[in-house]
Amino acid sequence: MSRYFTEDHEWIDVDGDIGTVGISDYAQGQLGDIVFVEVPDDGRRIAKGDEAAVVESVKAASDVYSPASGTVLEGNPALVDDPSLVNSDPEGEGWFFKITLSDPAELEELMDETAYAAFVAKL
Amino acid sequence: MMSDTLPDDELEPIEILTLPLDAWHRAKGGRMVEFAGYHMPVQYDGIMAEHLWTRENAGLFDVSHMGQLTFTGTGTGPGVVPALEALMPADIAGLALNRARYSLLLDDEGGILDDLMLTRQADEQVYMVVNGATKYDDIGHMIERLPDEVTLNLMEDHALLALQGPKAVDALVRLIPGVEKMVFMQAGAFDWNGHALWISRSGYTGEDGFEISVPGDAVEALADALVAQPEVKPIGLGARDSLRLEAGLPLYGHDLDPTTTPVMADLGFALFKRRREAGDFPGAARILAEREGGAATKRVGLLVDGRQPVREGAAVVDAAGAAIGRVTSGGFAPSVGAPIAMAYVPAALAAPGTAVQLSQRGKVHHATVAAMPFVPHRYFRGVK
């Protein structure tokens, strides 16, 4: 399984043609206490870069863009009752949604973990 | 991921000033943002934790961006009290020494130019705290209208701290004995290690607490001494905003502005009886007519259904989706455990319990008009 990152601080784990998307630890730290998450509906077709989810902290509302194109398999139901999972485990239990990838080649444009760490270090 | 409402996005191309505690905030891990033209800490540990800490213990807020003003008369001529009464609807003549009062600086049409706290320090001396973002406009407005016999001094060499929360008194009394004897909206001069402080039992969180005016060169030592108390943690602007929202207290520039009047803003308590009877404050004709017949719109509290915050800028909409009002503050309320908001709505929708619809980013939210405060005030009004 490989993990990729976007410059907008989303991550995507890829296992076969299934991708799991979330926001990075850096992103949750910048947002602060997360109080609400809206995930996409099952079956929704999204293109890379589309607004796919909304995350709201005490101070701000932010859009989460899809790192890849595909069809939504499911949103993370745990975030409805406990959005703070995004703070406590952003790159694990706090995942946002899973998609069936329609164009895995898109992933080549994303950063790997090392490149993302270097990207964040410069912010 | 892209944020559309982080305060960092509001940076303007003007010089951002620093306050006396700037380095102290950074050393304490404060995340600094621009606010009212200054670098200010928006949070330290996190807004939620800081908010809840303040409601249970005591929070230390740096509010040095606010304008501290003194007005002094010569003892001859018209004097400080009538000069200030001409600008606002407060009864200052009837204000006892060392007592504080909330008031509103009004334009000639009754629009609100600022909200403020004033304290009678002597017969011919009034201390006033105004909002940071409006202080220079306020000063310009007042200087133009004050008689020559009244001197206005901006206390730029002073910082202002707010210590707020149910344990604020326990912490402060250890440093400054005697503060516990004051009640809500009482003030006085105190000494701390040779530094002259002006302390009032007041604040903007709905909790018991104090506001401490301190010389800028002593504020770091005082802040250190305060956070050394086990009850006290430094608290940022983020929690200050969520605390005042829960307390139902309006924020100037958001819930109040020149298009709102005291009656629209539901601040009728600031219209004192003697002043209403005399009708001698700016905009009195319009304001008294609104008080009698009701204003077209009114500031109300809203409990928002679900978990998603509805924030400033969202519209109040009718069944057909047309805008009939506006949300002026909103967010997740940590002590309530749900999103709340303040909005201006048509008078017919202002009664508590009324269902309203809100529109934000293309999505409709349901809300119910609620009596404010959302969290009961716990001011210290004396031992019963």
Image (cartoon, helix red, strand yellow):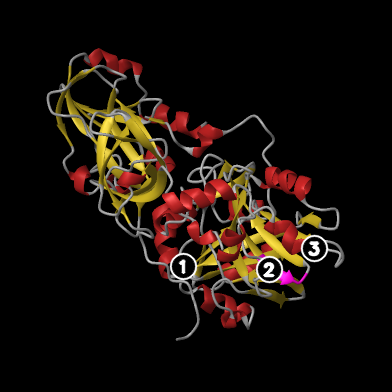
Q: Return the residue at label 2.
A: B93
The reply to whether dot 2 and dot 1 touch (C-beta < 8 Å) is no
Q: Position of residue B254 (x, y in %)?
A: 49, 43
Left or right: B312, with B236 as reference point: left
Residue type at mark 3 is Gly
Q: Which residues are magenta?
A: B119-123
Q: Is residue B329 visible?
A: no
Q: Badge 3: how crowded within 10 Å, few (<14), some, or many (20+)?
A: many
Same chain shared by disc 2 and disc 1: yes
Which of the two residues, B370 or A40, is positioned nearer the viewer here? B370
Please give the name of the residue rendered at 20% of the width and 32% of the height, measured from the top-left corner. Answer: A97
Q: Position of residue B56 (x, y in %)?
A: 41, 69
Mark toward the start of the polypeptide (3 vs 1): 3
Badge 2: chain ID = B
Mark toward the start of the polypeptide (2 vs 3): 3
Residue type at mark 2 is Ala
Same chain shared by disc 2 and disc 3: yes
Q: Position of residue B38 (x, y in %)?
A: 64, 44
Q: Is residue A82 visible?
A: yes
**Residue depth check, mark 3 versus mark 1: number of the one nearer the observer:** 3
SS type, badge 3: loop
